[in-house]
Amino acid sequence: MRCPFCSSEDTQVKDSRQAEDGTAVRRRRLCGKCGGRFTTFERVQLRDLQVLKNSGKRTPFDRDKLMRSVRIALQKRPIDEDSIEQMVSGIVRQLESSGQADVSSTQIGELVMEGLSELDKIAYVRYASVYRDFRATEDFGQFIESEKLADEG
């Protein structure tokens, strides 16, 4: 494993343990050259997924990009990191086990919406505002009313 600080390949695993509900291995590593410490995650990948964008463009699926978008929606919300990891891992497992090598960006967006609606209603509305391209404050009200979120808090 290459060190993210100095790019040396002289790194050692100092600690390994299960992470993400047993779906990944978390490894603490130490660089022999610069002494930097960093963490890596090892996950099972069932297949290489390709994302079909609305423009027709095809790009490799990027779990980190999915994680970033979920974290943005959950910014400053009282949700622990394990819950976020479990949600994202669940989405990735659903995509990989679908039997399709190509998944649409719409399919991914719908799975994120579903996951966030169960995890945190505020993050769900935040994500929806970008995903559904809200243009005015009325769009928020209509979405909340249509989703019956107003009574749930």
Image (cartoon, rainbow, N blue to C red):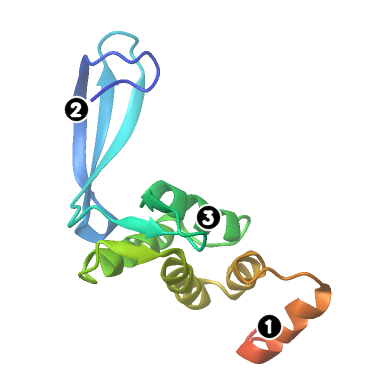
Whether tag 3 and tag 2 are in contact, CB under 8 A, the answer is no
Question: Sequence order check: which comes first, mark 3 or mark 1?
Answer: 3
Mark 1 closeness class: few <14, some 14–19, many ≥20 residues within 10 Å: some
Q: Which of marks 2 and 1 is in front?
A: 1
Q: 150 or 95, which lies in front? A: 95
Residue 131, image x and y in percent? 60, 67
Q: Where is mark 2, residue-wise?
A: 13
Q: Where is mark 3, residue-wise?
A: 69
Determine the image quadrant of residue 111: bottom left
Residue 63, image x and y in percent? 37, 51
Q: Residue at x 20, y 33 (%)?
A: 15
- Position of residue 4 relative to residue 145, above or below, is above
Residue 153, image x and y in percent? 66, 83
Q: What residue type is labelled 3?
A: Ser
Whether tag 2 and tag 1 are in contact, CB under 8 A, the answer is no
Q: Which of marks 3 and 2 is in front?
A: 3
- Position of residue 48 relative to residue 88, above or below, is above
Question: Sequence order check: which comes first, mark 2 or mark 1?
Answer: 2
Q: Which residue is drawn at 26% across and 27% down?
A: 29
Q: Which residue is drawn at 24% across and 67% down?
A: 100
In screen coordinates, is 73 left or right of 86? right
Q: What residue type is labelled 2?
A: Val
Q: Where is mark 1, residue-wise?
A: 143
In screen coordinates, is 80 left or right of 98? right
Q: Which amino acid does label 1 sit on?
A: Phe
Q: What's the CA distance linking mark 2 and mark 1? A: 48 Å
